[in-house]
Every structure is written in C-alpha cells, then in structure tokens.
C-alpha cells in the first residue's frame, strides 16, 4: 500500500522543488518589502500593504487567472518575455513556483516585518554613534536580530507552497511530470476510479510534510533566538 508509483514520486519531488524555488525567489523581495513597511513612511503605504497581503484574502483561482493574463504566452508581460528571451512560465513548473511564491509571499513578509519591528532601535543608534555605516549596521545588527522572523517566514512560506492548489492549476494546469504537484496529484487521484488508495498515500505524506514544516519552524526559530540571546 505504501509503495509510491513513479508518478507519485514525481509529484512529491516536484512539490519539494517548486516550494524550495518559491522560497528562494521570495526571500529578497520579502525582506525589502518588510523593511519598507517597518521602517519607512511614504504616501500610499496603506495601499502598498494592502497589495502585499492581498493574496491572503483573494481566491487562489483569481490569483492564478491574473498570472495567466500577465505571464501567459499571450499575456501582457509573458508575450514580451517569450518573444524577446524565449522565456515561458505558463504550463511550466517554473510557473508553479511563481504561483506558490506569490501565495506564500504575504506570510513571509508578515513574519519578517514583525521581527524587524521588535528590534531595539537604540542598539542600531548606538552602533551608528560609534561610527558604523548604515549598511554595516544592517548586516551586523539588524539582519541577525531579524533572523528568527526570516526563518519563520521562510518555513511558513515553504509549507504554504507545498499546499498550493488553486493558483497553480489555473496558471499552469495539471500536467503529469511538469506541473502536477502533490495537491494536484491528490485531486487527480480522487477523480479516477480506484485512485483512493494512492490518494490516501499522498494525503498521509502531505500531513507528515506539513507537521514536519511546523515543527521545523518552531525549532529553527527557537535555536535562532537562543543564539541571539546566548
């Protein structure tokens, strides 16, 4: 019962690959957005924050359809990318990574922002007073103190990416070996006769991965916090 078929192993590996790329691509812009939201005052900040958190409240299908309009083969941006560089995201695993990154992005930004807001600004001021430059203060003080939030946001985004379904199936469809991630494989198996046993296997794996992600997030944040205060 617990022997995975080649297609099931492919879906599992693809989900891990997509989630890892989604987190890696999201981290730099998430850190920048969190810095802007936590440290900078500017006109339209409320609108900016609303746009960042919008994927949390929008139906995932809407997000996927917007991605299709923008980055599809004939989309506003996608057509230019394809004609100029030959880059195509729609119906590719890279498109699944983009969809997962967008859906997990607000969680990552939120965690990093809260961590930044908890940093004692007096430490940064003291370092500047002693002659440290702005960038040195950021990389030697601010960033290390924000590490627990960065870790938590990255792991939460990874877990969210593992479970992404609506935006992915809308933007990149459900292609075996190319875009069929774990949630899409479970959905497919529940629609075919005799697929219940295989679907159950993947459901158990999904639950195990989700629990492992949550436990890892807690342990990594705890370890990072202990290192900072130890």
Image (cartoon, rainbow, N blue to C red):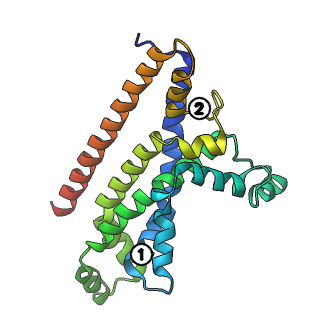
Residue 182 vertical position relative to residue 114 in the rendered view, above or below: above
Dot 1 corresponds to which residue? Answer: 37
Quadrant including the C terminus: bottom left
Query: Which residue is the extreme one toward the bottom?
Result: 129
Q: Secondary structure at mark 2?
A: loop
Q: Is residue 24 visible?
A: no
Quarter of image, res 177: top right
Q: Which sits in the foreground, 139 or 178? A: 178
* Residue 141 pos. (x, y %): 30, 72
Judge left or right: residue 130 versus residue 70. Answer: left
State how far apart marks 2 and 1 are (Cα). 35 Å
The structure residue drawn at horizontal position 52% and vertical position 29%, both measured from the top left corner, is 187
- In the figure, residue 159 lies in which quadrant? top left
Q: Return the x and y of residue 152 as percentages of the image width and height.
A: 33, 54
The residue that appears at 44% across and 66% down in the rendered structure is 31
Sequence-earlier tag: 2 or 1: 1
Q: Is residue 88 above or below residue 14?
A: below
Is residue 123 positioned above or below 168 on the image?
A: below
- Front residue of this view, candidates 83 and 195: 195
Residue 180 on image: x %, y %: 59, 32
Quarter of the figure with the N terminus: top left
> Residue tagged by mark 2?
180
Q: Is residue 129 in view?
A: yes
Residue lying at 44% horizontally and 14% vertically, measured from the top left: 197
Circle 1 sits in a helix, a strand or a loop, which is it?
Answer: helix
Residue 40 is left or right of residue 99, and the answer is left
Give x and y (percent) for residue 185. Answer: 54, 27
């Amino acid at each position: 019962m617990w022997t995975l078929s080649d297609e099931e192993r492919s879906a599992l590996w693809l989900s891990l690959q997509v989630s890892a790329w989604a987190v890696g691509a999201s981290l730099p812009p998430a850190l920048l957005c969190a810095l802007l939201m936590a440290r900078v005052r500017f006109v339209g900040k409320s609108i900016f924050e609303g746009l960042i958190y919008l994927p949390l409240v929008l139906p995932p299908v809407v997000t996927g359809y917007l991605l299709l309009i923008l980055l599809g083969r004939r989309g506003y941006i996608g057509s230019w990318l394809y004609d100029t560089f030959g880059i195509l995201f729609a119906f590719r695993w890279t498109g699944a990574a983009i969809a997962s990154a967008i859906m997990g992005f607000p969680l990552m930004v939120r965690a990093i922002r809260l961590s930044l807001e908890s940093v004692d600004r007096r430490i940064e001021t003291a370092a500047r007073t002693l002659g440290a430059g702005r960038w040195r203060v950021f990389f030697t003080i601010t960033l290390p103190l924000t590490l627990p939030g960065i870790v938590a946001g990255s792991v939460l985004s990874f877990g969210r990416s593992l479970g992404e379904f609506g935006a992915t199936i809308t933007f990149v469809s459900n292609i075996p070996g190319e875009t069929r991630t774990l949630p899409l494989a479970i959905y497919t198996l529940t629609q075919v006769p005799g697929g219940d046993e295989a679907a159950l296997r993947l459901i158990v794996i999904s639950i195990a991965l989700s629990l492992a992600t949550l436990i890892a997030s807690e342990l990594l944040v705890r370890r990072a916090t202990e290192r900072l205060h130890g």
